[in-house]
Amino acid sequence: QTRLMETGGGTVQAGRSLRLSCVTSGVILSTFTGSVLAWYRQSPGKQREQVATLSTSGATDYADSVKGRFTISKDNRKRTHYLDMNNLEPEDTAVYYCSMGRYWGQGTQVTVSS
């Protein structure tokens, strides 16, 4: 059974950094490397927003609101992808979800205090 689990969320002050990790289990390596990896977030009362994507060719894409501050990366051997978040802002407060293809994690809360 394919499962994704996010870790690394928490509460930080504005201007600080966090790294989110998403570990995928129950898949062979080629499935992981052959899937688009992504991070999304959802704030209360708002729609889920795509934050960052990493294509199978290694191309990345970011929401305008996080460009220059967030970085998506992966470690194929660990079947893990990451979201490095720098210079966090209160507006980044949300539940962050990872995805691998059509599979989703349960989410991890990130709260940024001013």
Image: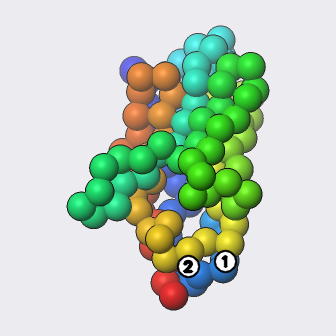
| Other residues around mark 2 within 10 Å, as few (<14) / some (14–19) / many (≥20) | some
Answer left or right for 98 relative to 82: left
Compared to residue 39, the image places residue 68 above or below, namely below
Mark 2 residue element:
strand
Query: Which residue is labeled 2 in the image?
Result: 12
Q: Which image quadrant is residue 93 in?
A: bottom left
Q: Is residue 78 visible?
A: no
Q: Is residue 41 visible?
A: yes
Answer left or right for 86 relative to 98: right
Q: Nearer the viewer, residue 16 or 48?
A: 48
Q: Tell me what residue is drawn at x 47 percent, y 71 percent.
A: 91
Mark 1 residue element:
loop
Q: Which mark is residue 61?
A: none
Query: Alpha carbon of mark 1 to alpha carbon of mark 2: how far?
Result: 6 Å
The amino acid type, in three-letter code, at marker 2 is Val
| Other residues around mark 1 within 10 Å, as few (<14) / some (14–19) / many (≥20) | some
Residue 52: image location, x then y, percent: 59, 43
Pointers 1 and 2 in contact (C-beta within 8 Å): yes
| Extreme-left residue of the structure | 45
Which quadrant, please, contains the N terminus? top left
The amino acid type, in three-letter code, at marker 1 is Arg
Q: Nearer the viewer, residue 78 or 55?
A: 55
Q: Tell me what residue is drawn at x 68 percent, y 72 percent.
A: 87
Query: Which residue is labeled 1 in the image?
Result: 16
Compared to residue 20, the image places residue 37 above or below, namely above
